[in-house]
Each structure stands twice: as structure tokens, then as C-alpha cells.
Amino acid sequence: MKRIIYSILKKIPLFRSLFERISFLEKRINELELVVDYNFYKGLHPDNYADALKSLYRMWAGKTLDIENPQTFNEKIQWLKLYDSTPIKTRLADKYLVRDWVKERIGEKYLIPLLGTWDKFDDIDFDEFPEQFVLKANHGCGWNIIVKDKHSFDVAAAKEIFNRWLNTNFAFVNGLELHYKDIPPKIIAEQYLENYDGDLYDYKVFCFNGIPYYIGVDRERHTNHKRNYYDLRWNLQPFSISKCPQSVSINKPYSLDEMIYLAKILSRDFAIVRVDFYLLNDSSLKFGELTFTPESGMARWNPPEYDLILGQMITLPER
């Protein structure tokens, strides 16, 4: 009923203007809160990281974070952020440097073709670019601009966004993902990828101690994001995360065995890592990224008991 009343009021000019102002103010308040949080975490002494994570976890989950004896998936990710943000993870979280590592281990054919790298946005010559491409900041997660039509690409707006990203340390953006802290910021451009239906099929292989167990399949990431989880025999699993509900079941990909084999190679020596691949129309695979702290350890698992079930699959390294 509230939704119906709201939709009716939005059609009245006076109320529409009021709602627009409220929406603008809410957006500005959210932006200011993010800035305050970022500066708080960036200004912390490392000795205070554990207490800061405990406070953040209590605000988010409503319960105490057991950092000394973690049991659940989310708790163990917090532990890994504090005690296992190693130099190799920093290198492999770098979307540029990881390319050489992937090339060495599984071959260059699995890399998305690179169009260039730059330290400053002003150094990019877009006249040399194809009609479609993807711009990424190498030192964060989700810092991408997908360009499907170069002629309608707002260069000035993109410059403003990238200048902000380049001056932001991602380690302090989303709950102290400290392995991002020492990545030198760069801009990279990659070839644009797309499947027949305009989507891009994204397969996320969850590997525990070097062994693949589950594969999350993302659909409609930029419109109505959904994710199914499957085991290695392609049985749909009964769990999900709240921000990515399940969709209809998806056929097993022809490249499944190859994907599992590659993920096993790339996940070796890590307590947990998510190895992402894109599946193209010809069933070939392209490497996406390595994610060492999925959801920054703040996933709302449905049903909730899978937080513990998945957590028991992680064997933490010695401190």
C-alpha cells in the first residue's frame, strides 16, 4: 500500500520535487559518511585494527567477533584480513601485476587482451581505442567503467571518477582489506567482452586450501544481480547471499572441467581464494581476478547456518 501511495505522490509536481530533494540529501549524507569512515580507518594505527574490526563487525552483524578463535566464514575472513595480508596477496590483488603470475601458471591465452596502462588519466589517448572497452583501477574492487559506445563516453566524468579512485586506498574503503594497502595505483584498459545476450557470464570458483568446492555463477550484474552456487558436479546448492539471490538454474558449461583444473592451479597455497573466470560464447575462458576476502567477510548467508558450514572448510594458516 505504501508503495502505491508513494508512486501516486511522485506524479504530483510538488511532491516529486520534494522527493528529489530528499533523495539528493540522502545521497550526500551517505557520501559524507563514507568519507568520514574512510578517514577514520586510514588514520588508525595498525595496533588498533583488531579493535576497529570488532566494532565494525558488531555494528554490521549485531554480535561479537571472535578474532582469536574464529569459526564462521565471516569470522575467518576477518582473521585473514588482520593476520594473513601477505605481500603475495598484495601482488595478486593488483589487477595489472596478477597478469604475469597468471601467464606463468596457466598461459597467456586466458588473459583478457590489455589495451594499455597509465599512471594518470590525462595520459590516455582515447582516439587509439576501439569502440568498446573497459577501464579499471588496478588497486581496488568494482572500480570499473564499461564503455559500450566510445562516441557517447563522457571523458570528463570518467576523469573525475578515476582521479578520486587513484587517490583512494581501497584497503580502508570496505572494512580493512589490508592486502590492497600497498598496491601502486594505475589505470588499465582491457578489451570489452560480452556474451550473445549482452550479459557477461561470470563464474566464481571458491577454493579452500587449494581445492575447488563451489562455483558461483553471476547473471545480470548491472541490472538485477543474481548468483547461483553449484558444486563441482553441477548440483545447485541450497545457499546464497542476500544481495545476490538465486536465479533459475543454469546449464553446466562445457568448460567446467577446464575451469576447475585452472582454479586448482591458481588457488594453491591459499587458505581461501575465489578464482573468477568469464565464459565466452565459444566456451573459451578468460581470467577475471583473485578475491582473497569475499564480501570483506560481511556476507549475509541464506540460510544463516552456511556461515558456519563454509567457515569449517577454511583451515587458517599458522600465525
Image: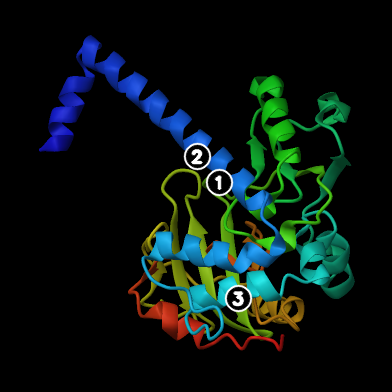
Going by the numbered disc 1, the residue's amino acid type is: Asp
Locate the C terminus by quadrant.
bottom right
Placement of 266 over or under 147, stated as above or below: below
Tell me, yes or no, whether the two marked residues, 1 and 2, touch with CB atoms within 8 Å.
Answer: yes
Which one is earlier in the sequence, the residue at label 3 or at label 2? 2
Q: Is residue 285 visible?
A: no
Question: Looking at this view, is 170 or 285 the one in front?
Answer: 170
Residue 33 is marked as 2
Residue pictured at 56% horizontal, 83% vertical: 68
CA separation, marks 1 and 2?
Answer: 6 Å
Count how many numbered circles sit on residues in the image: 3
Question: Looking at this view, is 122 or 64 the one in front?
Answer: 64
Residue 79 is marked as 3
Placement of 210 over or under 74, stated as above or below: below
Would you name the residue on which mark 1 appears?
37
Q: Residues within 10 Å of mark 2 (few under 14, many from 20)?
A: few
Give percent across and percent down for residue 287. 72, 62
Left or right: where 59 falls relative to 49: left
Give percent across and percent down for residue 70. 52, 83
Callout 3: SS? helix
